[in-house]
Image: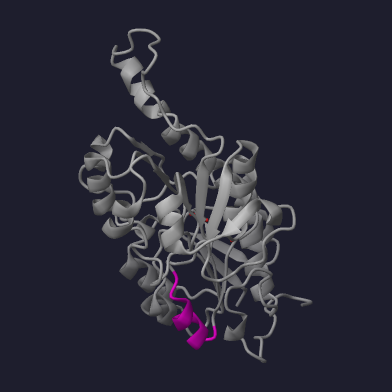
């Protein structure tokens, strides 16, 4: 019985090279329905499952993988699709890919921030529709970034990388984070920690960088959107459900806020009714980590997490090392 790794969608190089040097790699080459994934795991058991963020890995999937499955190595930094508590109870470690996608995701947040604040998407539409009649003094005026207050919600790696970029544009930075993460030395003198309500009230731009959890689902709903400045811009590159999307559509339609730049949606790939018609929304199709370099680095990390688990070592990026407690499973690799 050779060590076996299953991925749902094929992952980019160097994923297969790393995994195949020590184990059998099987790929479904498609996103299975929930029941199909369970059937697949029962029919042909594997040691490590490498899902991506659209595969829901709940207790039923984990049970289908037992007794053999020891690790779920997610090809993403966000792992809200995995029931981590259920994995821990079952002695299954969960790996993810933080760090390597920080800059790409922060770049994406800045792209959305700039496009929304400076009305680039509206302008693009005007131009293509033949409605641009030449330069005019008050045509498509947007938000000046210099001295504008950027409120960052969630001040982990990505939130801090956005702060670093925004400082280059002369923005002032406030952040809210319920977990008081360590703030990088280079930023400390330039950022202010504030309460959530204060951030919502004062920010000219709000950018979301929290993981999706019970606590953050619909963090930005009607009440928050109504308390934001009418000139404010909302940017979301985290998870769609952190925002109540139906409320956001009303906010954009009725002008409670000025604009939004979104990379993630509540029910991807679907958009809430009316969102596509909101001219002040800049919409990207979940491209945060979508650069050639970053996707390769994620593939490498995802593969190493899997190989670590096969060798009986807690994956180098593990969100629940306690799942193995004192007793890591034996190595499945020859010579390991
Ligand atoms: C992408 O959204 C990720 O979590 O990596
Ligand atoms: C993700 O990598 C984060 O900590 O923001």
- Quadrant housing the N terminus: bottom right
Q: Where residue 120 sits: x, y (%)?
A: 42, 27
Residue 24 in view of the camera: yes
* Relative to 17, 216 lies left or right: left
Task: Please tell me which residue is depicted at 44% across the width and 29% down the height of the picture.
Answer: 118
Which is nearer the eye, 12 or 79?
A: 79
Residue 76 in view of the camera: no
Q: Magenta includes 316?
A: no
Find residue 170 and report its image quarter.
Answer: top right
Task: Please tell me which residue is depicted at 74% across the width and 75% down the height of the picture.
Answer: 334
Q: Where residue 260 sits: x, y (%)?
A: 37, 42
Q: Where residue 241 sits: x, y (%)?
A: 35, 59
* Relative to 148, 266 lies left or right: left
Q: Main secondary structure of the magenta part?
A: helix
- Quadrant housing the C terminus: bottom right
Up-down relation of residue 253 to residue 94 (above or below): above
Which is nearer the eye, 118 or 148?
A: 148
- Number of callouts in the render? 0
Which is nearer the eye, 90 or 157?
A: 157
For this orientation, the residue located farthest to the bottom is 326
Find residue 281 and report its image quarter.
Answer: top left
Task: Please tell me which residue is depicted at 65% across the width and 38% down the height of the picture.
Answer: 168
For this orientation, the residue located farthest to the top is 134
* Relative to 24, 233 lies left or right: left
Q: Which residues are magenta?
A: 82-91
Q: Where residue 135 sits: x, y (%)?
A: 40, 10
Which is nearer the eye, 44 or 88?
A: 88
């Amino acid at each position: 019985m050779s060590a076996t790794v299953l991925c749902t969608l094929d992952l980019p190089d160097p994923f297969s090279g790393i995994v195949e040097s020590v184990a059998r790699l099987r790929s479904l080459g498609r996103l299975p329905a929930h029941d199909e994934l369970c059937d697949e795991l029962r029919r042909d058991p594997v040691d490590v499952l490498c899902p991506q963020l659209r595969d829901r890995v709940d207790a039923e999937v984990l049970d289908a993988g037992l007794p053999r499955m020891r690790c779920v190595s997610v090809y993403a930094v966000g792992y809200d699709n995995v029931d981590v508590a259920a994995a821990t109870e079952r002695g299954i470690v969960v790996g993810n890919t933080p760090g390597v996608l920080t800059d790409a995701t922060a770049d994406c947040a800045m792209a959305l921030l700039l496009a929304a604040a400076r009305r680039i998407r509206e302008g693009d539409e005007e131009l293509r529709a033949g409605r641009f009649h030449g330069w005019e003094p008050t045509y498509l005026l947007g938000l000046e970034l210099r001295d504008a207050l950027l409120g960052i919600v969630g001040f982990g790696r990505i939130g801090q990388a956005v702060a670093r970029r925004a400082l280059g544009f002369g923005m002032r930075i406030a952040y809210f984070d319920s977990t008081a993460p360590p703030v990088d030395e280079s930023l400390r003198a330039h950022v202010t920690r504030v309460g959530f309500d204060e951030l919502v009230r004062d920010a000219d731009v709000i950018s979301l960088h929290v993981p999706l959890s019970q606590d953050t689902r619909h963090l930005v709903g009607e009440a928050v959107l109504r308390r934001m400045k009418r000139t404010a811009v909302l940017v979301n590159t985290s998870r769609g459900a952190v925002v109540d999307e139906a409320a956001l559509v009303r906010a954009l339609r009725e002008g409670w806020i000025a604009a939004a730049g979104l990379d993630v949606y509540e029910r991807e790939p679907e958009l809430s009714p009316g969102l596509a018609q909101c001219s002040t929304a800049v919409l990207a199709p979940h491209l945060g980590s979508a650069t050639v370099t970053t996707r390769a680095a994620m593939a490498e990390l995802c593969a190493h997490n899997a190989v670590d688990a096969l060798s009986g070592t807690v994956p180098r990026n593990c969100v629940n090392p306690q799942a193995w407690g004192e007793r890591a499973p034996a190595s499945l690799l020859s010579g390991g």
